[in-house]
Image (spheres, rainbow, N blue to C red):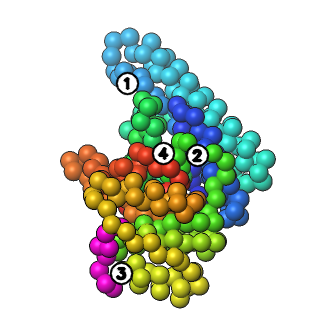
Amino acid sequence: MKSILVNIPTEREFRPLIDAAISLATSLDTGLDAIAFGYETTSIGLATEGGTAVAAIFEIEQERAMARAEAALSIVAVEAQAAGVPCRCMPRTAVPYDAAAAVSALARLYDLTVVLQQDPDSDTFDNTISQEVLFNSGGPVLLVPYTHKGVLRRANIGIAWDGSRLAARAMRDATPLLTGARKITLISVNNTAPFEASVQALKAHLARQGLQADVIETSAGQADIQPTILSIAADESLDLMVMGGYGHSRLKERILGGVTRDMLESMTIPTLMSH
């Protein structure tokens, strides 16, 4: 991974995200591109009576939004410089919908995009970014829990495996991270994979690449799959989880699969997803 994009929130605490992204860039010996959006909330059209006054209000709103983006990125720049990580900062302004679309489009040029997990207790536009990037970037997304503390470790990595296309995509996207792992744990819940793509077949495939992996197979009801995965993650002291991001778009509404939705809401460790 030679190009990493990180989306910095401007309306939420982002210390967990900075610590994770900078430590990851350090371990991969690469730079970091950071983007932050100050949100414009003024939606008044300019072609109205009193247009000059409205234009002045709109300009002030843009200036304030840019100041919020620059303030967030100034912290990133200081932390990156202290860690010796090259960092390019990109402050932007936009209405929330356009911001999500812009981050998703930009993410298509990067090997990895790092975002902060949504916070259900925080009513902010920043909460929408992670899901939009997962659906629309076309690449791997590393979600950092808002409860995360310290550097991002990747000595012990878990792969949630069901033999599906999305699980395979996530596994391949995570290969640069797997090569540096001390331990890899393959997690199979309910053994739904076809024989050719079974968890044992994956273990053999990784072994041919010089990656040794342990296998944990278990069963769980549909509603208990995500808690089971997180329980295994805790028992095995996993630093990072790799899994497919399931869902589809219906009439432009993002519909998440149950396990993906539950993981986005209550992940306990950094999780790399691919959709």
Mark 4 lies on residue: 117
Mark 2 or 3, nearer chain start: 2
Residue 237 visible from this viewpoint = yes
| Residue stretch in magenta | 189-197
Location of residue 144 in the rendering, given as x and y in whole percent from the top left corner: 53, 49
Mark 3 lies on residue: 197
Mark 2 lies on residue: 148
Mark 1 lies on residue: 43
Location of residue 4 in the rendering, given as x and y in whole percent from the top left corner: 59, 58
Q: Secondary structure at mark 1?
A: loop
Residue appearing at x 64%, y 32% in the figure = 71
Mark 1 or 4, nearer chain start: 1
Residue 79 against residue 175 in the figure, above or below: above
Kind of residue sitting beneath label 4: Gln
Indicate which disc residue 256 carries.
none
Distance CA(mark 2)–CA(mark 4):
10 Å
